[in-house]
Amino acid sequence: MKRYEYDVFVPLTFNDGTPVPLAVLRGYQERLLDEFDGLTVFPQANHGFWRMGGVTYRDEIIIFRVVGSARRTARRFLTKLKEELERDLRQEEILVVERDIDTL
């Protein structure tokens, strides 16, 4: 069966440096678990860097990883989730990565 892996990169702070409440992160975690029946969280702080307008920005992020077999359904769910994360966490963009995977 063909499967797809999705990584959702979630900042740990708002743009003003205020920490995102743990309850908010857990809420998104639960929604992903409910939708995909499995979830891996990479809780160690990862550092993301990007440039915009000649300015380098830095975020501390965690990564939520899920695997699904229904690509269209997963994309629809994750597109909506991405929009909510961008709005709720006041981000210009939340990165969601999709990969085709083979499992044993």
Image (tube, helix red, strand yellow):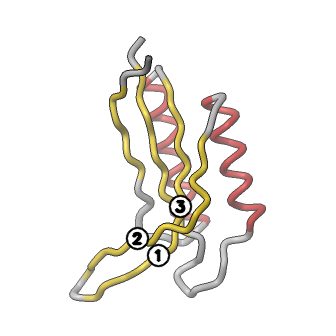
With respect to residue 93, does 75 lie above or below? above
**Among the 4 quarters of the image, the one containing residue 87:** bottom right
Q: Nearer the viewer, mark 2 or mark 3?
A: 2
Mark 1 crowdedness (10 Å alpha carbons): few <14, some 14-19, many ≥20: some
Mark 3 crowdedness (10 Å alpha carbons): few <14, some 14-19, many ≥20: many
Which residue lies under the disc numbered 1?
59
Marks 2 and 1 in Cβ contact (< 8 Å): yes
| Residue at image coords 31%, 85% | 56
| Residue at image coords 52%, 55% | 63
The type of residue carrying mark 1 is Asp
Which residue lies under the disc numbered 2?
48
The type of residue carrying mark 2 is Gly
The type of residue carrying mark 3 is Val
Most extreme residue toward the right is 23
Query: Alpha carbon of mark 1 to alpha carbon of mark 3: how far?
Result: 9 Å
| Residue at image coords 45%, 40% | 6
Give the quarter of the figure containing the C terminus: top left
